[in-house]
Image (cartoon, rainbow, N blue to C red):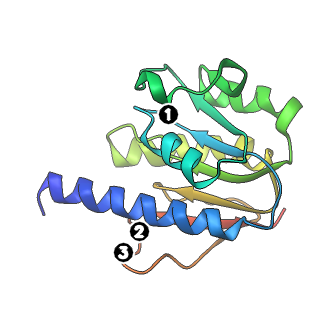
Amino acid sequence: MSRLDSFIRRLEAQRACLDRAARLIADLTGPVLELGLGNGRTYDHLRELLPERAIYVFERHVAAHPACIPPPERLFVGDLRETLAAARKDLGGSAALAHMDIGTGEAEASRKLAASLVPALTALLRAGAVVASEPPLEAPGLVALELPDGVAPGRYHLYRFSG
């Protein structure tokens, strides 16, 4: 498979999982967390899917399209381990959805980074929250969910947080 085809499949899987996650939290209150802003594509998609929700973004360094940068009061810039921990004071235990898109470009490095963030991330989630993530996650309370039709196992991941 070419890198272009792989990229397209990843984006299709990402969109399908975010769409499903939005439906799964329809009856759950709470903000959305976007870990990794990148150029802002998924943040923009989440704004369209969930226009009534506050979306908080965590990013090391902002380099997104200007139309896809959240307002300063909803943007945490810096090392995600530190900013997620800092957000606990205001957001702890309230988030209904988290999307982790923190790819480093190298699969093993991305998995290690994701694993290091999981404890701080789960501290921000409410019971019943959904997590969508490219790297697989393991943590107490995270239960894998069925993927949408057309998403190959391992391409993207969905979890429910039991709290």
Which disc number belongs to residue 154? 2
Q: Is residue 10 left or right of residue 121?
A: left
Please tell me which residue lies in front, 61 or 119.
Answer: 61
**Mark 3 is on which residue type?**
Ala
What residue appears at the point 52 percent right and 41 percent down from the top-left corner? Answer: 43
Instruction: Indicate which label's residue lies in the foreground, 2 or 1.
Output: 1
Look at the numbered discs 3 and 2 and tell me whether their residues touch, using CB distance below 8 Å: yes
Please tell me which residue lies in front, 65 or 149.
Answer: 65
What's the distance in space between the residues labelled 2 and 1, CA to CA? 22 Å
**Mark 2 is on which residue type?**
Gly
Q: Is residue 2 left or right of residue 80?
A: left
What residue appears at the point 69 percent right and 27 percent down from the top-left corner? Answer: 74
The first of marks 3 and 1 along the sequence is: 1
What's the distance in space between the residues labelled 3 and 2, CA to CA? 6 Å
What residue appears at the point 60 percent right and 75 percent down from the top-left corner? Answer: 145
Q: Secondary structure at mark 3?
A: loop
Which disc number belongs to residue 152? 3
